[in-house]
Image (cartoon, coloured by chain):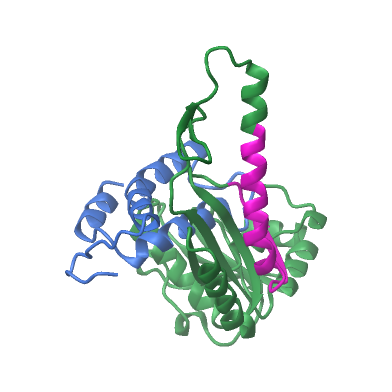
Amino acid sequence: MLWVYAIWEHAPEPPLAAIATGLADAPLDAVRAGPLAAVVSRHAEAPASPTRAALWEHERVVEALMAERPVLPMRFGSTVDGEPRIRAFLDEREAPLAAALARVRGHVELSVRALAREPAPPDLRSSASRDGTRTTTPPDGTSGRDYLLALLARERVADDAADALHAPLATLAADAHRAPPRDVGELLRGAYLVPRAAIPRFRRKVDQLQARRPDVTFLCTGPWPPYSFVESEDDGFTR
Amino acid sequence: MGASRNQAADNLVSRDDVALVDLLDRLLAGGVVIGGDITLSLADVDLVYVGLRALVTSVETAEAQGLSLPTSNGRRR
């Protein structure tokens, strides 16, 4: 079985052994097809389950590769039964993969999440009015329609808030994605494809936003390999 | 998963916990997919998410509320 770490343009140097060692101390190898190559390690059985340690281990390998030249990272757990399967994939996808590599060249991915310091109320039943008294909505008589309208209004407010946080960051990025928030109180979950040289500028912008919004906690991590930018809608990738 | 929980308990709060959420987002939901050859089923991925996130979410909630939590070696962030 082959565990696949990343796809990049084929180049014989430097040797993979000089860059990193794979999962379970297995040596890295390249499976080449045309101008592209997949970086793999060989195993009798799956070398990793998704534990915290294994996820970081996989990430360590991809980051070491990324330090050499542009990579398209694989999703964790990508395995194939043999080289022909990888070659067929690289052949079939050569154009979109090459286009994606060209897009990410010289760029890294930065992650920004913004969390409200005050957790959002769990539901609409209790809300504070302007004068500080608490009112209860919807009261028993309130229609389902009013309730839904209130829900929609709240969603729109959250959406606008996310836009206000996302837009100034996206202008510093070659590409940017907003993922739907996963948690209550999460205002923004963004991924930004940023030129390496612009990382300090991007971080300063996050600091500026943070200074302006004491009601929000910004969590910025990276640089990551471009996991969120391996495909474009134009490429015809399917997941 | 059991091993990761133990490790998490040993190292209760660290920068890694914040980054772990972003790592999960990327390694388990991003990246190139070779159709049909992922060792993890979608259900497995959800389980991983739930398992690894339980700790992280509590850390973040504390952080978002402005609490400073002691790290395992006694330092505060």
Number of numbered callouts drawn: 0
Chain B's shade in the image?
blue
Q: Main secondary structure of the magenta part?
A: helix
Q: Position of residue A233 (x, y in %)?
A: 78, 54
In the displayed image of the protein, which residue is found farthest to the right?
A234
Q: Is residue A9 left or right of residue A235?
A: left
Using the image as rendered, state which of residue B17 and residue A56 is in the foreground: B17
Magenta region includes residue B36: no
Residues A154 and A44: in front is: A154
- What percent of the width, then of the height, locates residue A62? 51, 70
Viewer-closest of A61 and B24: B24
Q: Quadrant of residue A43?
A: bottom left
Q: What range of the chain is rendered magenta?
A: A152-180
* Left or right of A216 on screen, residue A165: right
Residue A168 among those drawn in magenta: yes
Residue A24 visible in the shown view: no
Residue at left offset 63%, top offset 66%: A192
Q: Residue A85 appears in which quarter of the rendering?
A: bottom right
Instruction: Please give the name of the residue rendered at 52% of the width and 59% of the height, measured from the top-left corner.
Output: A113
Viewer-nearest residue: A198 or A225: A198
Q: Residue at x 44, y 77 (%)?
A: A20
**Which residue occupies the extreme front position in the image?**
A131
Q: In the picture, residue B63 is in which quadrant?
A: bottom left
| Above/below status of B68 relative to B34 | below
Measuring from the top left, give residue A145's x and y in whole percent. 68, 19
Shade of chain A as shown in the rendered figure: green
Residue sticking out furthest to the top: A141
Q: Is residue B11 left or right of residue A135?
A: left
Q: Position of residue A155 (x, y in %)?
A: 63, 39
